[in-house]
Amino acid sequence: MAQIIFDHVTKEYKNEVALKDISFTVDKGEFVFIVGKSGAGKSTLLNLIMKQEDVTSGQIIVEGRRLDTMDAKRVPLHRRRLGIMSPEVGLLKDRSIYDNIRLAILATGNADVRIRSKVIKVLGLVGLAGKYHAYPDELSGGEQARVLLSRALAVQPEILIADEPTANLDPDSAWDLMQLFDELNYRGMTILVASHARELVTIMKKRCITLVAGRLAVDARRSIYDQKA
Ligand code: ADP
Ligand code: ADP
């Protein structure tokens, strides 16, 4: 069975249809970009998977679990199974990189055993093992993004969800981050990335789900924005 299933999902806010009748599936190990203009519904789609929001109608199933009937008690557990990179959960500025990662690991209910080696290991995955004592403001934008990725990986997720991860990055750093995503994907992790970085998405040649005003316009290896005549 597919790892993520959207079955005729509609999401309405008070006076706004954010997503309209969206259906698609994602298999384990796929790399999928969610693309579209600002306001197209990308963040809403990811927020639904994380169960930060609930569907208005339709159904979402993640790893065999229905989200609409999921017990409130189970929601934190569900979120911990996802690696989440979102602009809404930034780094703690008054904590070192080490503490930022350590706190994320502790939040998963992991006991404090051998935590140091775990922190160094996930920082190593993004090439920042040597920077664990630094504070967020002492790092470049690209390094901060890699710390956010590292924190997302700290929970050892099956699925990585990233909302506009390259938004504030220079082209080189954005490219480096994409290479890290590619590597993780190569090792079997499912990756979902919402992005309007059109050129970067084009170069990556991955599956693209294109949203236009809340509707699924195209699901293909290219976004409709790339399909110039
Ligand atoms: P982006 O285009 O980068 O995804 P948005 O400005 O659309 O950013 O959304 C940022 C966050 O603000 C999202 O999590 C979304 O849920 C929330 N948001 C967006 N629009 C509204 C709105 N009209 N009212 C309340 N919250 C909103
Ligand atoms: P994107 O991520 O593609 O920029 P969003 O998912 O953030 O798009 O937003 C899709 C639509 O839903 C937008 O019109 C936005 O204003 C609206 N929206 C998003 N979140 C909220 C919210 N919490 N409350 C009300 N409207 C929202």
Image: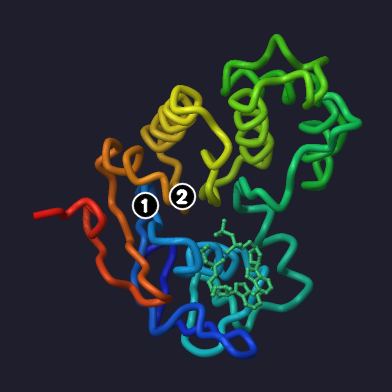
Number of numbered tags placed on the structure image: 2
Q: Relative to 29, is 222 on the left or the right?
A: left
Give the image's coloring scheme: rainbow
Mark 1 lies on residue: 32
* Foreground residue among 18 and 37: 37
Residue 8: quarter of image: bottom left
Q: Which residue is mark 2?
A: 193
Q: Amino acid at mark 2?
A: Val
Report the residue at 78% width, 26% height from top.
136
Q: Report if the beta carbon of the residue with label 2 is closer than 8 angstroms to ligand 2.
A: no
Q: Are marks 2 and 1 in contact (CB under 8 Å)?
A: yes
Helix, strand or loop at mark 1: strand
User: In the figure, is residue 224 to the left or right of 31?
Assistant: left
Quadrant of image for the N terminus: bottom left
Q: Quadrant of residue 211?
A: bottom left
Measured along the vertical axis of the image, is residue 182 above or below residue 63?
above
